[in-house]
Every structure is written in structure tokens, then in C-alpha cells.
Amino acid sequence: MQIAQLNIYPVKSLKGISVKQSVLEAHGLAWDRRWMLVDAHQRFVTQRQLPALATVGVALTNEHLVLSHPNVEPLSVPLAAPEGNLRLVSVWNDHCKALPEGEEVSRWLEAALGEQAQGLSLVRFATEFPRAVEEDFLDGGAAHTYFADGYPFLVTTTGSLDALNQALVAGGQTPVPMNRFRPNIVVENDEAWAEDRWATLSKQGGGFQLALRKPCQRCKITTIDQQTANVPEPAEPLKTLLALNTQPTLKGAHFGQNATLLSGDGSVIAVGDSLAAVPRLFGRNAKTSYAR
């Protein structure tokens, strides 16, 4: 079993970047979800509200975050933190401190995406103000993240995608690629839904260890083509995931596991790393943290 893909999403809900290796940080992979778009009320904006965000490309150089779109010239945003007053922005029910990027980003977004992007601005997470992960699934521990929906890492497996796509095809639907689920770490594994039975995932020989905390409930972003922003089939793959019922004790459609870092802060994780999983204990005396 090994790592098949690593992906970072520097700007929440814009295109991701596939990388060969990354530095593991307690808050997530390096540069993951460091920026986010907000509306005039400082509320986070994602593909849920604006599917066209999927068409905005993202790249990182040594000095810049580079945004790209077919309609406009690329825009470079310095990696050096901007100067300015902190804003209080919201991600779901969390309120986070953030630094606003320049107004030129807002103008660029409107030029790229049209009126639907009017009023959007780009903010950067103020890293000196931590955002805690919900405590219910941490077994007494603590964790922090940046602008991710709730957890620093999302782990998926090729075996589960294969099982989902087999079910889609059997139902007369089109298979979906892994990017519909926007994972950070994709594990090559033949067994469907194996990740739901793992307690931890470690690099063989040492280096890092992740704790798999909570199944990831999926939303309508999974229905959006991550290249074109089109929605080929509005109900899929959510309808098929619901029918597969991979989490009988939970409501909704689930795919992948939210994770936190137990050890290895500052170490390098790479495509091809061999992994070892420790199974979750089930039974009367076992803690089944995601079955609450």
C-alpha cells in the first residue's frame, strides 16, 4: 500500500495542485487552504455557491501565488504576508482572523468570472490565531487547521473510487475522477472502503503518522466537473453514494476520511511512500469515534 497522489488547494475551492511531495504540517500539507474567497459579509464562498471557481487555476512559485483563467492574464500574489488590518471571516460556524489581499485580486476575479464574482475578495489565514478542529472526534487530543472545511487532511483510496465507479456504471451513469472529492492524500489500495476501518496510517519505517478521525460527508461539489465547472448529472455521484450506504450509522453520503497529524510535523510526505495501517477497534469496549 502506498501513496498514489498528493494534492494541495492553496485557495479554498479553486483548482488544486498535484505535487510529488510536500511538507507535513499540523495544519495540513504545506500551503494547503492558506487563502479563501469571502463575500461582502466576510463569509466564505466556495463552488457550492459559485461552481465557476473550479475554472480558476492556481500555481505556486518561490515568491508568488499565481491565479490563472482563460479570460484574463495571470495574476501574481506575493507569498509575503500583506500589510493591513485583520478581518474576522467565517468558515461554517468558525470565525477566523485573516489578512485581506489587494483589491486588484477582486478586480481580476470579476474580469475572469463576470458579475457572479462581484464583491468577492481574497483573504489569507492569519496563522498566529489558531483555528481548532472540533473536539468530538479527537479522543481527548487537539488539532488545528486553516481554511479547510474542518480537518487538516482528507484521505481517500483508489479502492473506494473503483467501487463507487463500478456502482455508477452499473446504474447507467458515467464514472467520476478522484478530483471530484478534492483529497489531499490518495492511497493506492484495492480494498473498497478500507479507510473507514483504519485508526492510523503511518509511513513504513517511520516518519509520520496520521489519525483517521471522521468520515467525510460529501456535498454537491462532487457533482461539479473540476475542469469545466459543468454539472453533468446533478444528483451524481451523491445518489449512488447514498445507495451504497457506506456509513450506516450516519446520515448523508460519505467518501474518504478526515485526518489529523499525530507525529511527523515538518517531515516530508511523497508519492510512492509505503504505508502501514492500524485497524480501528470495534466492539463493546472499543471507541468508535465516528459512530456518534
Image (cartoon, rainbow, N blue to C red):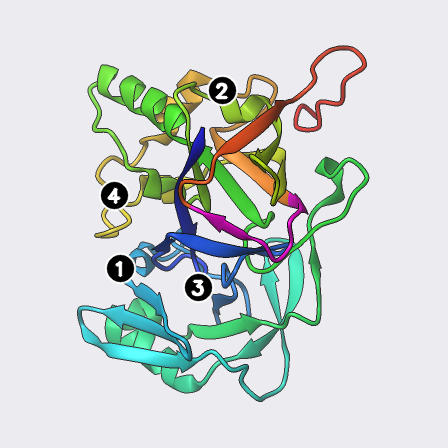
| Residue receiving disc 3 | 11
Give the image location of residue 104, x and y in percent. Answer: 37, 85
Residue shown at 61% from the left, 34% from the top: 212
Q: Tag 2: Cα neighbours inside 10 Å, few (<14), some, or many (≥20)?
A: some
Distance from disc 4 to disc 2, alpha carbons, whole Å, reads 24 Å
Report if the CB atoms under discs 3 and 4 are less than 8 Å apart: no
Q: Is residue 165 magenta?
A: no
Q: How many marks?
A: 4
**Stretch of the chain drawn in magenta:** 261-270
The residue lying toward the viewer, choosing from 225 and 19, is 19
Badge 3 or badge 1: first in the primary sequence: 3
| Residue receiving disc 4 | 231
What SS does tag 4 mark? loop
What SS does tag 2 mark? loop
| Residue receiving disc 2 | 246
Badge 4 or badge 2: first in the primary sequence: 4
Give the image location of residue 110, x and y in percent. Answer: 30, 75
